[in-house]
Amino acid sequence: MRMDLTCPAEFVSVEVLRDSGGRAQAYLTFRNLSEDTLVELRAMVTMLDGEGASLGQCPLRYRRLQAKPHALFTLCMVMDELPFFRDARVTLQRVVFAQGEPWVSNEDAQVDCTPKPLASGPQRSALMAVAGPDAVCWPERRQDTWVCVCGRFNLRPWRICRRCRRNRDDTFARYELNAVMAQYQRQRNAQEGGERTEKRQAERTPIVQHNRRQADFMRRIKVLRARRRGLAMALIAVVLIAWGLFSR
């Protein structure tokens, strides 16, 4: 994938749906990477079939938008005269903001932005557990760019990732392979310790409940015995009083 890293917005995903009448519409989701509200967007969409083959291109232009800074926004594309497609590549050509100069694409500035894939396995599981579910690759420094764990390429001087807002230096310090595996092991140890504690508590619960019932039963027995002794003493007192009266 090639892109101009200075582009202040990026394509995220597409979902193509049909309504009850069979009319197809594509919902294109973008992310505003800038600090300003995005109000206009112009792009070229390459429509792809299920195998990734191109079905043609379609120009897009949206005005009067109100895409908030660093937020996702979704645009609807009517497909009445377009082929039904499964996926898409979107090349942004012009982005206009509420303030400041518009951004215009420069093909000469485009670079290869394909991160090294991280195959499923223990390392990927560890990275996602430590860095978060959006982590797709190890951070990497290249000649003029650095790659964040979220897969976004950033120009080397940028200290903050344009996509996920992670700090560059913190990313390389925290998400290096050895650091991630060590943190992942600590998390697993803490989780296993918590599970053992919960298991012990679960095992103790019936015993504790039994002891509480036994203690409550014994308290009731003591109260009953005390009441019986009181009744017995009262009865003896009545008998003695009656005997004294009779003896006179």
Image (cartoon, rainbow, N blue to C red):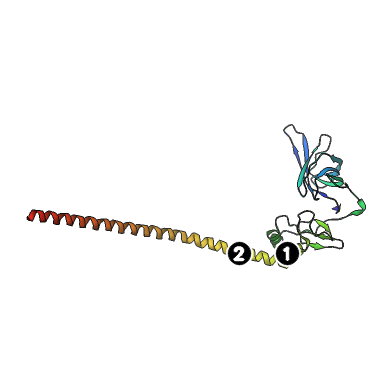
Q: Nearer the viewer, residue 111 or 168?
A: 168
Q: Residues within 10 Å of mark 1 (few under 14, many from 20)?
A: some
Q: Quadrant of residue 186?
A: bottom right
* Residue 190 image position (x, y, % from top left): 60, 64
The answer to whether residue 55 is left or right of residue 132 is right
Residue 243's place in the image compared with 62, above or below, is below
Residue 99's place in the image compared with 204, above or below, is above
Instruction: Please identify, in this view, whether the residue under mark 2 or under mark 1 is nearer the observer.
Output: 1
Identify the secondary structure beneath mark 1. helix
Numbered tag placed on residue 53 in the rendering: none
Q: Nearer the viewer, residue 42 or 227?
A: 227
Residue drawn at x 67%, y 64% is: 184
- Separation of residues labelled 2 and 1 (CA atoms): 19 Å
Q: Amino acid at mark 1?
A: Arg
Residue projecting furthest to the left: 248
Q: Quadrant of the C terminus?
A: bottom left
Residue drawn at x 19%, y 55% is: 235
Residue projecting furthest to the right: 108
Do the residues bearing badges 2 and 1 touch, measured as CB atoms within 8 Å?
A: no
Numbered tag placed on residue 190 in the rendering: 2
The answer to whether residue 61 is left or right of residue 182 is right
Q: Which residue is mark 1?
A: 174
Mark found first going from the N terminus, 2 or 1 = 1
Q: Residues within 10 Å of mark 2 (few under 14, many from 20)?
A: few
The answer to whether residue 220 is left or right of residue 200 is left
* Residue 66 image position (x, y, % from top left): 79, 42
Residue drawn at x 53%, y 63% is: 197
